[in-house]
Image (cartoon, rainbow, N blue to C red):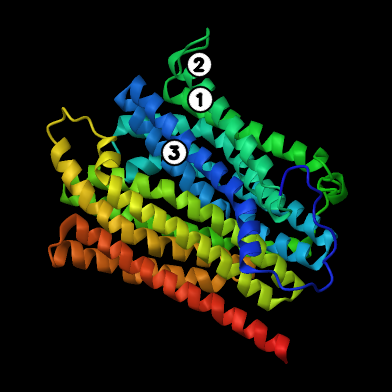
Amino acid sequence: MTVSTPSPGPAPSPAAPMSLRRHGARTLALGMPLVGALLAQILIGLTDTLMLGRYSGEALAAGALGSTVFHALFVLAGGFAFAAMGAAADAVGRGDERTVRRTARMGLWLSLGAGLGVMPLMWFSGDLLLLARQQPGVAADTEGYLRIAMIGMVPALLTASLRSHLSALERTRIVLWVTLAATAMNIALNWALIFGNLGMPEMGVRGAAVASAMAHAATAALLALYAARGPDMARWALFRNLHRPDGEILARLFRLGWPVGLTLVSESALFSGTALMMGAIGAVPLAAHGIVIQIAAFTFMLHLGLSQAATVRVGRFAGQGDPVELRRAALAALAISGVAVAVSVVVYLGAGRWIVGAFLDRSDAQAAEILTLGLSLMGVAALFQLVDAAQVMALGLLRGVQDTRWPLVLAVVSYWLIGIPAALLLGFTLGFGPVGIWLGLVVGLVAASALLMARFFHLVGAMEGRADA
């Protein structure tokens, strides 16, 4: 749906069933701008890394560590914004415009509160990093970065809430264009503030933090402006009575949101744990792991964007009380994700040497070792894509039917009681090394995808049984 297309109104009267092809087309129209926006966010982190790397190794280390901490706290606090997407889509499906705006407003409230809540962790991050045995110089520089970057935390979370509101209304193209503009702004500000160009002070890693905070603030302001004054957006009256608390919706979003944040953190911690395992083996495995995990993260954005689109599509039919179309919408989204997985596997296996090699300086003494191991990991990553896509799609579908607590339990069991032990067993006890650690990741994600998919289709079956009754 284009930016200028009118927003959906009251729930339509029963119509002829939609074909899977039409469901797929609607999912793609909704999801591809979200994919583009997520890839643009990845590009922001990539350009920060490249530009700080050209400034100094110390700045690169502090910036990378600071960005990791910022992202982890953002994911933890962002559960409320992600939960609001499914709740708002459900209300749109019912034609309940009042609940749509109530959900968006309380999503903004919770995002503001969560952002303020994590700020002390960023302000005192230096002491926490020293406790984590980081080098004193890196800890000090990272704390300096985070004390500036934390100014952007609340705008980043407000952006996530506004993105959920606009996505529920199928207004995703504006999200893409604003994110691309913010990416360009971040690059320009980095160039000026990291290196001291255009008469600006040379701030190094702190300049990157200022650029990120300003980009987040600009993104939130532009999306808020569109939400208030965009084509056919005034009818939603998002900011009218924003100051008034809404206890019912606030409590509901809180109950839905905190499990989402913890689920996302548990998944991120799984990958952090495997990085520590790689580091215990040696520098070459850690370097190869770092390269392949970046490649996997890039393609993961495709499935994450489709997952968010699936949340909206499934949420609408849940609101309409139509389990048949809900199931068809889910199957269409899964089919599109399956095609994306197939393309990724072909690219991984066919162009793996070129992709991994692009990250390496061939004159480096360890480049050949890293390339060889990286190619082995790319083979496992091809399998990894299938199960990783399935589990993130299942999570998106479950959020569409506003089921968040059981997914948290199933995810923690899969990641930490199955995935981590499997990685330790295969990587160390059985001696398969780095490839074994990645196979352990696959085992954990297989469990997650199977359990989460079973949970979703069980809920859909129950809905169909109630509808038949």
Q: Which of marks 2 and 3 is nearer the N terminus?
A: 3
CA separation in Å, label 1 and label 3: 15 Å
SS state under label 1:
helix
**Would you say 182 lies left or right of 446 here?**
right
Whether 281 is drawn above or below 181: the answer is below
Which callout, 2 or 1, points at the residue further toward the start of the chain? 1
Residue 424 position (above or below residue 240): below
Q: Where is residue 2 in the image (x, y as percent from the top left)?
A: 72, 45
Helix, strand or loop at label 3? It is helix
Seen at 51% across and 54% down, the residue is 304
Residue 274: percent from left, percent from top: 29, 55
| Circle 3 residue | 67
Q: What residue type is labelled 1?
A: Ile
Disc 2 marks a residue whose amino acid type is Ala
Residue depth check, mark 2 versus mark 1: number of the one nearer the observer: 1
Considering only order in the chain, which callout, 3 or 1, is on the residue closer to the N terminus? 3
- Cα–Cα span, label 2 and label 1: 9 Å
Tell me the number on the disc at residue 192. Answer: 2
Residue 199, compared with residue 117, is above or below; it is above
The answer to which of 69 and 85 lies nearer the viewer is 85
Left or right placement of residue 351 versus residue 169 in this view: left
Residue 414 % position (x, y): 39, 70
Q: Can residue 404 be seen in the rendering of this structure?
A: no
Residue 150 in sight: yes
**Disc on res. 187:** 1
Badge 1 vs badge 3, beta-carbon distance below 8 Å: no
- Residue lying at 50% horizontally and 68% vertically, measured from the top left: 408
Please indicate whether residue 394 sits to the left or right of residue 442 in the image.
right
